[in-house]
Image (cartoon, rainbow, N blue to C red):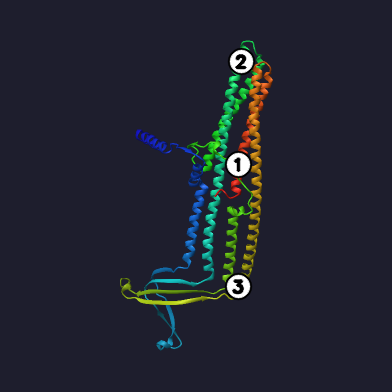
Amino acid sequence: MLFTAVLSFTVLGLWAQTETPKTYTFNLEQCVTYAYEHQTTMLNAAIDQKIADAKVKETIGIGLPQISGTADLKDFLKVPTSLLPGEFFNQPGTYVPVKFGVKYNSTLGASVNQLIFDGSYLVGLQASKTYKELSQKTFNRTQIETNVAVTKAYYMVLVSNKQLDLLNANVSQLKLQLDQTTALFDNGFAEKIDADRLRVIYNNLLTEKQNIERSLGLGITTLKFQMGMPVTDRLVLSGSIEDVKLDKTAFNKDSTAYANRIEYSLAQTAIKLNQLDLKRYKSQYLPSLSAFGSGSYNYQNDNFKDLYDQSFPSVLVGLQLNVPIFSGGQRYQKVKQAEFAVKKSQNDLFQAKNAINFDIENSITNYTNSINSLESQQSNLNLANEVLRVTKIKYEQGVGSSIEVTQAQTSLKEAENNYINALYDALVSKVDTEKATGLIK
């Protein structure tokens, strides 16, 4: 029992050592790079690429020589018997049973087949390369989606940090004001209600600060999840909101920007695949030609130990030509279906182009509006700070009321919240516009 307990504690200790959380300090670029290497969707997309490579090699293998070997051993417990006409044995009108063969029989052989011409195979080679191209583009799309998700989660953390900084500054100055007002009340120079009003606002700010701190922790956990990082690891962001450039003139409407989008490229590849599918069905009208050959050694004997003393070889080579003549109209209908599929994919390409152009225009408009809103809320925040500063001076000089101070304090808090919301909207709009215009790759 003692040994078992010691062993258990040792195993648990080793497990705890291997599971020790790691600490990372990343900026945005490093977060995205980490996600490319660890996010499950990215790992699966990379595996899909390897599957596509293997599929191409599998298709190529169809046109290479196909070689197989065979071996068998037969023990005829009862040698087959045939009836021969009695005329062969001077017994006309009767049948004489005769055994053909020997008790033991063994064959060793090999065969080879080589495709010489098959239109479907040639088209299949082209299609397999296009399929590999499709897997690469699908990987790129996954990469873009991962980049966008990580960037938005990263910006959410930066915005929460900014909000926390504003709250900390607000709490500090309000605490100072509350202490001053409480001192004035204690000396009979202020009413109790003046201190109570400020205390209510102060308590509300403390509660909001705690909520933001918890939201910040959740935001970092969300970012780690989007990166594919174990949520038990510690992540510290080295960047700040000031590092992000928000310029309303950063994006211009470009009539050719749709060509930069991976969705448009995927639609083009879909057309290529459908066209190759149509070509494959048409190639089925063509004949196919293949060569084959085989060789074998046959061993026969009534005595097992002498079975392989003598062999009877057999070798053959040949050509096989398959000519399609009539299939009940099946090939024709397959060709028609493939033609319709090509037309559908062409319609999808037009729709993709139209949708991307709409997305570009819409995202640029939203981004411009969000920058305007951010500038307006920044101006309101500055104005609210100035109003609070002037109101406090008036109150301290006895020419203003405490109600004006609390109202100014409430307005500042509202202005800060509006600014934070506008800031996050602007950052999200920036990412959406970068994605829409094909800048994220």
Q: Position of residue 235 (x, y in %)?
A: 49, 37
Q: Which residue is mark 2?
A: 182
**In this view of the protein, which residue sits in the foreground, 384 or 223?**
384
Q: Amino acid at mark 3?
A: Ser
Q: Position of residue 413 (x, y in %)?
A: 64, 28
Crowding at mark 1 (Cα within 10 Å: few <14, some 14-19, many 20+): few
Say whether residue 206 is visible: no
**First in residue order: circle 3 vs circle 2:** 2
Decide: is 145 above or below 76.
above
Residue 172 sits in which quadrant?
A: top right
CB under 8 Å between callouts 3 and 1?
A: no
Q: Amino acid at mark 1?
A: Asp
Mark 2: secondary structure: helix
Q: Which residue is mark 3?
A: 327
**First in residue order: circle 2 vs circle 1:** 2
Of circles 3 and 2, the one toward us is: 2
Mark 1: secondary structure: loop
Decide: is 292 above or below 21.
below
Q: Amino acid at mark 2?
A: Thr
Say whether residue 205 is visible: yes
**In this view of the protein, which residue sits in the foreground, 221 or 15?**
221
CB under 8 Å between callouts 2 and 1?
A: no
Gap in angstroms between the C-alphas marked 3 and 1 = 65 Å
Q: Position of residue 420 (x, y in %)?
A: 61, 34
**In this view of the protein, which residue sits in the foreground, 85 or 126?**
126
Q: Which residue is mark 1?
A: 247
- Residue at image position (66%, 35%) is 376
